Amino acid sequence: MKKLQVKQTAQANLPTKYGNFQISIFKSNIDDRNQVVLTKGKILKEPVLVRMHSKCITGDTFASLKCDCGEQLDLSLKKIAKSGGVLLYLNQEGRDIGLENKIKAYALQDQGMDTVEANVGLGLPQDARDYSIAILILKYLKIRKINLITNNPDKVIQLEEGGIDVIKRTPLEVKSNKYNKSYLQIKKKKMGHQLKIK
């Protein structure tokens, strides 16, 4: 089995409504997926503010109300734009089950299953994400100590096990709506996310 490695393949300036970022593309030696990294400001001191955001075309691009992904991305970019930091936009659609399977899972949710039950009903893990590539990208950027924007304890565990010191965790909770309330409750109850929602 190949040892996972990453390399930066492209880089440019990216002016956005949040401010000016630098955008970089990273690829691994095991697949052809693009991993996108946005950096704001020079990384001069640690802990660095970091958001690891999994790609969500339905939430990030089409503003779906079934999840909180688009709003989380928006808030993360605002935080990073304000104080500097890094956003890793990871190519892990649907908790890394892929877009087609994610839409199949949506159909099962329309029939009454929750997000975990839908994934399992398709014979898939409830969360297939592995953050090894994110760890290697952070190390490539010479970042070892971070302030992680997340509600997900699994991210903290995987980063710590990979040699990234999570000095601080910054919560990222958005207001629920009638379409995503049960989704957020399942995140809390079945997946251990640190959320205030009841």
Image (cartoon, grey):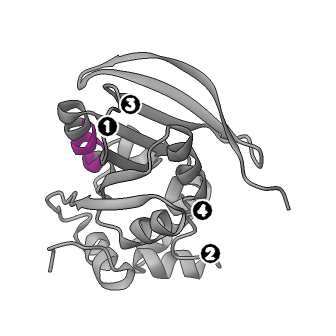
Residue 100 percent coordinates (x, y): 61, 55
Q: What residue type is labelled 4?
A: Ile
- Residue pictured at 61% horizontal, 35% vertical: 26
Cα separation between marks 2 and 3: 33 Å
Residue 60 percent coordinates (x, y): 37, 42
Determine crowd level at label 2: few under 14, some 14-19, many 20+ residues with C-alpha closer than 10 A.
some
Q: Which amino acid does label 3 sit on?
A: Thr
Chain-order first, disc 2 or disc 3: 3
Residue 172 versus residue 58 in the image, above or below: below
Q: Which amino acid does label 1 sit on?
A: Gly
Chain-order first, disc 4 or disc 3: 3
Query: Circle 2 is placed at which residue position?
Result: 124
Quadrant of the image for the C terminus?
bottom left
Query: Circle 4 is placed at which residue position?
Result: 97
Determine crowd level at label 4: few under 14, some 14-19, many 20+ residues with C-alpha closer than 10 A.
some
Which residue occupies the foreground of this view, 77 or 163?
Answer: 163
Which element type, helix, strand or loop, lies under badge 1? Answer: strand
- Residue pictured at 35% horizontal, 32% vertical: 43
Cα separation between marks 4 and 2: 7 Å
Residue 78 versus residue 157 in the image, above or below: above
Chain-order first, disc 1 or disc 3: 3
Cα separation between marks 4 and 1: 28 Å
Cα separation between marks 1 and 2: 34 Å
Is the Cβ of the residue at disc 4 closer than 8 Å to that at disc 1? no
Is residue 162 among what the camera can see?
yes
Position of 41 with respect to 102 (left or right) is left
Q: Is residue 72 magenta?
A: yes
